[in-house]
Image: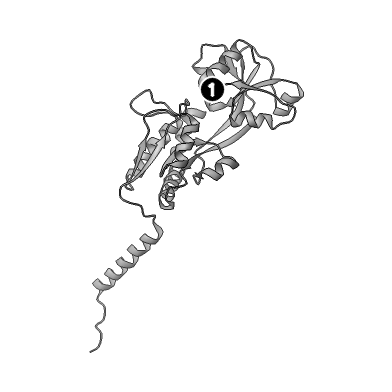
């Protein structure tokens, strides 16, 4: 018995099946109840937890990402308490699906985490000085040449970077930003090296007579880090949404609120 010729309806149905199969191949598939945990650092203006809605540069990125992920059946649970950076990194590393916004990149962290496909903002290292300070260094080499001792937070990448430059005098026995501001204001140290995101905010809200010098010593991108245990499919979804935020101008708009 000869085979019947496919009708237009059956051809249409076949095309639908083929298209659906193709989408399965190119779209990452995750469980319908997939959950990602977003951790929050006690670092302003990166994060603000003083009100019901999380704010700050990374806080706003989390909120926008949460809305986008919900449309893809992925829940972003944002922590409601601050954690210190060492604990955040440990919990992201050991947890099944944690993320942290605002991480610098280095060889040691590359071994521990998966980085987002794109950075979400950049910070520049600058120095804090007393309002009456006349000295204006042009580079770290000049700081070393002039024999200027520079303060830095203990155990930070900023302190390590300064120390990597031969001849630079670094005083890194400083354990909090409040202490750093007080030492500069009372002229116990002349300059304090940190990033512009934090220093611009601190000077704006400080009662001390301080200023941020205009020299940018280096500029470094900051990323979102993912738990190494997170599934590749879930990482792909996060990367896609961050890229969409970049393409739409959402990331740039958030950045302007804190970095311009």
Q: Is residue 139 visible?
A: no
27 vs 173, left or right, is: left
Name the residue located 45 percent from the left edge and 44 percent from the top edge: 227
Eyeballing the image, is 47 above or below 16? above
Name the residue located 69 percent from the left edge and 32 percent from the top edge: 164
Eyeballing the image, is 132 above or below 214? above
Residue highlighted by disc 1: 200
Number of marks:
1
- Image quadrant holding the N terminus, namely bottom left
Q: Quadrant of residue 153?
A: top right
From the top left corner, tell me how far across and down residue 243 is, in percent: 46, 46
Q: Quadrant of residue 122?
A: top right
Camera-side residue of 4 and 57: 57
Eyeballing the image, is 23 above or below 3? above
Residue at the far right: name it: 145
From the top left corner, tell me how far across and down residue 30 is, in percent: 35, 52
Camera-side residue of 11 and 157: 157
Name the residue located 60 percent from the left edge and 32 percent from the top edge: 157
Q: Is residue 148 visible?
A: yes
29 vs 221, left or right, is: left
Q: Quadrant of residue 74?
A: top left
- The crowding category of the residue bearing disc 1, from other C-alpha atoms within 10 Å (few below 14, some 14 to 19, many at least 20), is some
From the top left corner, tell me how far across and down residue 244 is, in percent: 43, 45
Looking at the rendered structure, the secondary structure element under dot 1 is helix
From the top left corner, tell me how far across and down residue 107 is, in percent: 60, 42
Residue at the far bottom: name it: 1
- Colouring used for the render: one colour
Name the residue located 38 percent from the left edge and 29 percent from the top edge: 54
């Amino acid at each position: 018995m000869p085979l019947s010729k496919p009708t237009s309806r059956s051809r249409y149905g076949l095309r639908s099946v083929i298209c659906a199969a193709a989408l399965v191949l190119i779209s990452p598939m995750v469980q319908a109840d997939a959950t990602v945990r977003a951790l929050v650092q006690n670092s302003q203006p990166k994060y603000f937890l003083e009100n019901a809605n999380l704010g700050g540069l990374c806080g706003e990125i989390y909120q926008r990402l949460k809305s986008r992920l919900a449309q893809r059946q992925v829940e972003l649970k944002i922590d409601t308490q601050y954690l210190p950076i060492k604990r955040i990194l440990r919990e992201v590393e050991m947890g099944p699906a944690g993320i942290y916004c605002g991480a610098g990149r280095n060889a040691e962290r590359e071994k521990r985490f998966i980085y987002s496909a794109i950075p979400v903002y950049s910070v520049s290292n600058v120095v804090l000085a007393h309002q009456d300070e006349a000295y204006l260094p042009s580079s770290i080499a000049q700081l070393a040449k002039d024999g200027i001792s520079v303060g830095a937070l203990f155990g930070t990448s900023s302190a390590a970077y300064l120390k990597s430059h031969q001849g630079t005098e670094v005083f890194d026995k400083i354990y909090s930003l409040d202490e750093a501001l007080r030492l500069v204001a009372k002229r116990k140290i002349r300059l304090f090296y940190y990033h512009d995101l934090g220093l611009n905010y601190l000077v704006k809200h400080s009662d001390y007579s301080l200023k941020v010098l205009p020299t940018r010593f280096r500029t470094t991108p900051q990323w979102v880090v993912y738990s190494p245990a997170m599934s590749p499919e879930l990482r792909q979804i996060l990367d896609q949404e961050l890229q969409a935020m970049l393409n739409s101008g959402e990331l740039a708009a958030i950045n302007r609120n804190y970095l311009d």
